[in-house]
Image: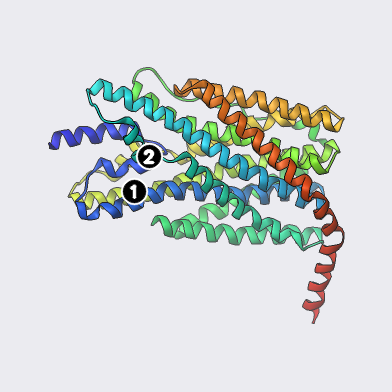
Amino acid sequence: MASQRDQTSTNHIEIAVYGNVTDQPRQSPIPEGDEDDTFDYSQRTQWLRAAVLGANDGLVSVASLMMGVGAVKQDVKTMLIAGFAGLVAGACSMAIGEFVSVYTQYDIEISQMKREMKENGRTENVEEAKKKMLPNPAHAALASAIAFSIGAVVPLLGAAFISEHKMRLAVVAALVSVALVVFGGVGARLGGSSVVKSCARVLVGGWMAMTITFALTKLIGSSVHGNMTDQPRQSPIPGGDEDDTFDYSQRTQWLRATVLGANDGLVSVASLMMGVGAVKQDVKTMLIAGFAGLVAGACSMAIGEFVSVYTQYDIEISQMKREMKTNGRTENVEEAKKKMLPNPAQAALASAIAFSIGAVVPLLGAAFISEHKVRLAVVAALVSVALVVFGGVAARLGGSSVVKSCARVLVGGWMAMTITFALTKLIGSSVAGIASGGFAAVANTICIEADM
């Protein structure tokens, strides 16, 4: 019985190494009385990872986007429209990207499980096993979208009632900094990791994203047309044929980050540009917003991925130590975590590179077309083709259904662009009216009260 349990543990670790942290309790069965507590921490890992990634991405990407736009455009209307479009586009693309990437990972893991069961002569029910072990794509998508929206509201509220340009940027940066510390602290407390380390990670990362976006957009604001082709090359996905199990396990980590980043870059920047284009018809504003979205998104994707994976990292180490103490084992935790858990830096780099590659597509589509409606149509068409290509490549690499993968990303991308365009178009005139009169009145009232 003991040898059978050890064999199951080893096989199980090889199957779901990266991202699927809800399977860890099965590695080391613990006494029945502690079963509920272990399950609680395992489920918390899945939800916490999606929530931390979404909240940080909402805070950092929308704030950085608004800072980038504010580096070139000083009027509050443009800044708010870009921020609102970024909120809607980001929430949609985060949900869609999370759903697609988790589902892609889902298919890979099931194929891996079936292959191992066939090799080992086991007859477990794959459907039942996957429900217990793997994350729920819909839950992860919903958590990401809600968290992104909550985070993205902060910089919008900070900028809404301040007409003076430099003061507006300072308030946005200050509010986002406070919110990042709060989110980092809450995430650390829920996950049982270090509060100081978590807060430091998200705060430094957020400031880096805002600074880089502001500086780069400011630097090329007047010559955005000539600087859109200098994008980083995509890093090859690691893998080899020497060991099928290792290859698929490594592929899961890289594929998930790559699919999420590429889809988010394509959909969020395209949706952002469509939203801005619904209110602003000039190509310059559309390109500036798109470029700011590219830089902000790539930075926040990398930072968010790093922070969320590191949060998961800390939770899993605490979980492993608790299980080892319960079972009286003396394994080296440092060696175990290197084999079992994802590398935060690699996941962050893969997400940033993939995001940048995806985000270039709508920018190139809009760069050389002056006619407004044609520009929007070309962006939508190019993004649709790119989504199908990314979905197909991901499916082929992961061994999942090409048709299903392409359909998921294509439908999701169209939903994100349509929703962003419609909502931004709907409230664009309202924002313009408020920006032209309401904000100034509120600002004057605040100044009078401050003087009193």
Looking at the image, the residue that sits furthest to the bottom is 452
Quadrant hosting residue 92: top right
Q: Amino acid at mark 2?
A: Leu
Position of 34 with respect to 263 (left or right) is: left
Mark 1, Cα crowd under 10 Å, few <14 / some 14-19 / many 20+, is some
Q: Secondary structure at mark 2?
A: loop
**Residue beneath disc 1:** 317
Residue at 29 percent across and 24 percent down: it is 116
Residue 276, x across and y down, in percent: 77, 42
Quadrant hosting residue 34: bottom left
Q: Where the C terminus falls, by quadrant?
A: bottom right
Q: Amino acid at mark 1?
A: Ile
Residue at 23 percent across and 26 percent down: it is 122
Mark 1–mark 2 Cα distance, whole angstroms, equals 9 Å
Indicate whether 442 appears above or below 42. Answer: below
Indicate whether 216 appears above or below 326. Answer: above
Looking at the image, the residue that sits furthest to the left is 1
Q: Quick check: marks 1 and 2 in contact, CB under 8 Å?
A: yes
Q: Nearer the viewer, residue 213 or 271?
A: 271
Quadrant hosting residue 246: top left
Mark 2, Cα crowd under 10 Å, few <14 / some 14-19 / many 20+, is many
**Residue beneath disc 2:** 341
Position of 66 with respect to 75 (left or right) is: left
Q: Secondary structure at mark 1?
A: helix
Q: Where the N terminus falls, by quadrant?
A: top left
Indicate whether 72 appears above or below 376. Answer: below
Q: Nearer the viewer, residue 259 or 111?
A: 111
Residue at 38 percent across and 30 percent down: it is 109
Position of 331 with respect to 72 (left or right) is: left
Position of 371 with respect to 208 (left or right) is: right
